[in-house]
Image (cartoon, rainbow, N blue to C red):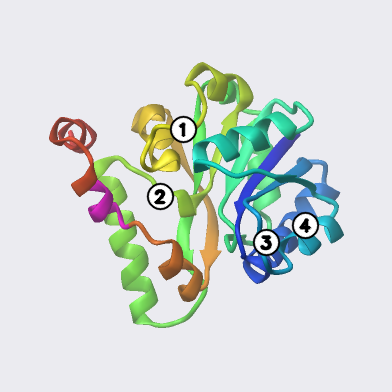
Amino acid sequence: MLTVVIATQDCEEPLARTLAALVPGAADGVVGDVVVVDAGSADGTAIVADAAGCTLVTASGPLGARLRRGVEAGRGHRFLMFLRPGAVLEPGWHREVGAYLDRPGAQERAAVFRFALDEPGLGARLSEWRAGLGGALLGLAAPQQGLLVSRRLYAKLGGHRDDAGYAEQDLLLRLGARRLSVLRTRALLDRRTAEGQRLGLAGLALRLPAAVVARRAA
């Protein structure tokens, strides 16, 4: 079983879509609990979380601190899954994740989902291709791909850090490409949500020390 942690702020509709996709995982026993860490939303985010049976935590401060607070508020399951509000895991995701959790050595590795836009057309496919190419060249993943990691490895790495400018990306960098698997399951985002959350891999590279980028690309 795993604990899902979602940090929110004024994202009622995206959160509802994300939670709806988690229902099969809860029914199948893969998802043990869902913690929504809200930074004081003025819309119906808290109502959605409560109606879905989530543990709702209100916390302000840096994103890293809020995500750690979500981990602490969970029920202590061996694995954690971090998702952005609006990320919709495609049908059947819980079967692949369940199999991943049972793999030998899963507690010493981490995994992300494949990034995808929930719309037809060449433009969407090109956006996905660019994201995949950036990830392949730099050895990076984006927070929109979610993160599946054991509680033990998360603690060993020190979790999300308060002083990191981009706490989610910072943790992914510390995990490193060699410990990170990409699952077949896609995390689908509509374009509006993706654009609102976007920090492209190319943009992220500009914010990283040159030595780090070189090491990821090697």
Residue 49: give its label: 4
Residue 162: give its label: 1
Q: Which numbered disc, 4 or 2, marks the residue closer to the eye? A: 4
Q: CA distance from mark 3 to mark 2?
A: 21 Å
Which amino acid type corresponds to the residue marked 4 in the rendered image? Ala
Disc 1 crowd, CA 10 A, few/some/many (<14, 14-19, 20+): some
* Residue drawn at the location 50% of the way across and 21% of the way down: 158
Question: Does residue 105 show up?
Answer: no
Q: Is residue 69 magenta?
A: no
Q: In the rendering, at what x and y percent does residue 169 appear?
A: 39, 41
Q: Is residue 148 left or right of residue 19?
A: left
Which amino acid type corresponds to the residue marked 1 in the rendered image? Asp
Q: Nearer the viewer, residue 122 or 190?
A: 190
* Residue drawn at the location 38% of the way across and 45% of the way down: 141
Q: CA distance from mark 4 to mark 2?
A: 24 Å
Q: Is residue 101 left or right of residue 182?
A: right
| For residue 201, above or below residue 102 | below
Disc 3 crowd, CA 10 A, few/some/many (<14, 14-19, 20+): few
Q: In the rendering, at what x and y percent does residue 136 appear?
A: 28, 47
Q: Which secondary structure, mark 1?
A: loop
Label 3 or label 2, whichever comes before in sequence order: 3
Write down the residue under mark 3: 91
Disc 2 crowd, CA 10 A, few/some/many (<14, 14-19, 20+): many
| For residue 140, above or below residue 152 | below
Residue 142: give its label: 2
